[in-house]
Structure formats: structure tokens, C-alpha cells
Image (cartoon, helix red, strand yellow):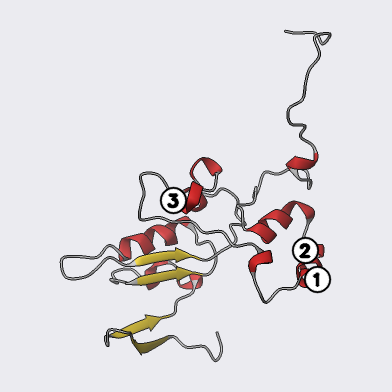
Amino acid sequence: TPGGIGSCLVRNKKGHIVSLVVKTYDMHTDAIKGANVGLIVFDEEPPEGTYVEAIMRTPGSNTREPGFTMILATMQKGLSQVALKYFPNGLAPENGLIPDEPEKFVMGISMDECPHYTTEDIEAMLAEVPMHERDTRRYGTPGIGSGRVYPILEKDVVIYNLKIGSDWPRA
């Protein structure tokens, strides 16, 4: 990025000097191979290979605490392999906790919870988004991704608790 930084040194609260390095997806996984990293933050959902490489860079050791990997993204790729690591069976975990994986946590934030957006801002932005993407954009829930055939929401066509009368033929 023109005018952006590639790296910098920061002194943390404990007085330790920490190196921050900025990488792009264009650099692929080669950019972090071999590194022992304390924190990796993805600002969009990463490709699965990049995610796996990040996990391999943050394990910790006898002399170092384990690192963290964070994904700060709207899961627009649907229930991809990366999304399914945080949304077991395609569902948001209760209280953000994933059973049997205490090192993982999911926290959803909707546009409505962002103090810098007014209701008018949200409505204006969503008016520009295809209808079938609006819940994903507004609430952060994984989108359906490729494979959705019709640009309509399931809730608009599904009838829940439908009572079928006894006069309907049965198989």
C-alpha cells in the first residue's frame, strides 16, 4: 500500500519491544513461513491454506507463550472450511464457545451495534447490497456463498409449523 508501513517496533505494557509486521494475501503463505508469531490478525476471511499456515506459526514453545490468530471479517464466503472451524454444523456457537475447543471463541457484531453508523447509514448501505447478502452484511452471519440459485431469503419462502390436513394423500 503506498504510504503504508511494512513493520514497526512497539513497546508493550510489560516493557518488551514487540515487532509488528504487515503482510498482504498477495504475499501468500511464503510471507510467514518459518516465523514464530505472537499474533496474526486477518481483516478478511483468509484462504484455507493461509489460515492453516497462521495456526502453524502461533503454537508457542518451552520458552514462549502461544500466540493468537484472529479473524475480523464478515464471512461472505459462506460456510467455507475456515468458517466451519468457528461455526460447527453451520451454526453460531452458544455463548461464543465451541465445545471441545476452548481456545476458540466467536463474537458476532452487527452493524446496529457500531456507534459510528446511524440507522440511516445502515439503510443506505444495505440498499446497495443484493437482498440475499443483506443478513450477512448486517449481522455478520456466514452467507450462503456460491450455490445459492435464487436471490431471495429462505425466511421469505419457508413456512414453519405447517399443519397438513388429514385429507392430504400420504405416501
62, above or below 81, in the image: below
Crowding around mark 1 (Cα neighbors within 10 Å: few <14, some 14 to 19, many 20+) is few
From the image, state whether disc 1 or disc 2 is nearer to you: 1
The amino acid at mark 1 is Glu
Disc marking residue 120 = 1
From the image, state whether disc 2 or disc 3 is nearer to you: 3
Residue at left offset 31%, top offset 65%:
58
Which residue in the protein does label 3 denote?
97
Picture quarter containing residue 133? Answer: bottom right
Q: Quadrant of the N terminus?
A: bottom right
Would residue 84 be found to the left or right of residue 55 on screen?
right
Q: Picture coordinates of residue 34 (x, y %)?
A: 28, 69
Callout 2 secondary element: helix
Residue at left offset 26%, top offset 85%:
16
Q: Earlier in the sequence, mark 1 or mark 3?
A: 3
Q: Earlier in the sequence, mark 2 or mark 3?
A: 3
Q: Quadrant of the C terminus?
A: top right
The amino acid at mark 3 is Leu
Picture quarter containing residue 11? Answer: bottom left
Picture quarter containing residue 128? Answer: bottom right
User: Is there a contact, CB below 8 Å, between mark 1 and mark 3?
Assistant: no
Would residue 115 be found to the left or right of residue 32 on screen?
right
Distance Cα–Cα, label 1 vs label 2: 10 Å
Residue at left offset 64%, top offset 62%:
110
Would residue 126 be found to the left or right of residue 138 on screen?
right
Which residue in the protein does label 2 denote?
126
